[in-house]
Amino acid sequence: MLYAIYFIYGLCVMFYFMMSWLFYRKDKEMLSRLVTVLMFVIGLQCLKDLFFIKPITELDEIDWMVVTAADMVAVPLYVFALIELCSPTSLTRRTIIFHELLFIVPFVLLSFTRDVVSIMSWCLRQPYTAQATLYGQYSPSPSTTPN
């Protein structure tokens, strides 16, 4: 049974990388580029999962959180593709990078620090601070301003 799972995952990896290549070659529009990146990221995630089907060592709860956090990077890419389908040319590179970083930074921090509580508190604080900063409505309180 394990061989069938590896075979199916191999087919998925091949499909996602092939779709990524085809959409890359299709044209230079934003939607094609978004689908290219999405297919490439999902292919990398399937490739990553091949190592965890039958793990060499036992993984603890934090390790599984890191693996799951790596999969969450694709979530904004789905949203960007839907936004581009509903409202073409409304997305900018700045918006894409900003929203993608909100998913990448916690994953990287969790990978290196393994401190779930501070990562979660950072994630809850970050969207408001970043959005307010982007739209010019954020001014730090006097207690947080260095003397």
Image: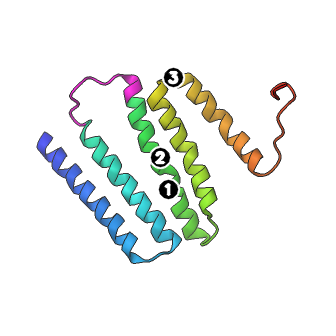
125 magenta-colored: no
Picture disc at residue 77: 1
Sequence-first tag of 2 and 3: 2
Q: Residue furthest bottom?
A: 27
Q: Residues within 10 Å of mark 2 (few under 14, many from 20)?
A: many
Residue topped by disc 2: 73
Residue 20 vertical placement versus 108 (above, below): below
Report the Cα–Cα distance between label 3 and label 1: 26 Å
Quarter-wise, where is residue 83 in the image?
A: bottom right
Principal SS element in the magenta part? Answer: loop
Residue topped by disc 3: 115
Label 2 near label 1: C-beta < 8 Å? yes
Q: Residues within 10 Å of mark 1 (few under 14, many from 20)?
A: many
Give the magenta-colored segment's residue range.
53-63
Task: Check disc 1 and give the amino acid type.
Answer: Leu
Colour approach in the figure: rainbow
Task: Check disc 2 and give the amino acid type.
Answer: Val
Q: Secondary structure at mark 2?
A: helix
Q: Secondary structure at mark 3?
A: loop
| Residue at 26% over, 55% down | 12
Report the Cα–Cα distance between label 2 and label 3: 19 Å
Residue 101: x %, y % from top left: 56, 46
Residue 125: x %, y % from top left: 68, 34
Task: Check disc 3 and give the amino acid type.
Answer: Asp
Sequence-first tag of 3 and 1: 1
Residue 35: x %, y % from top left: 44, 64
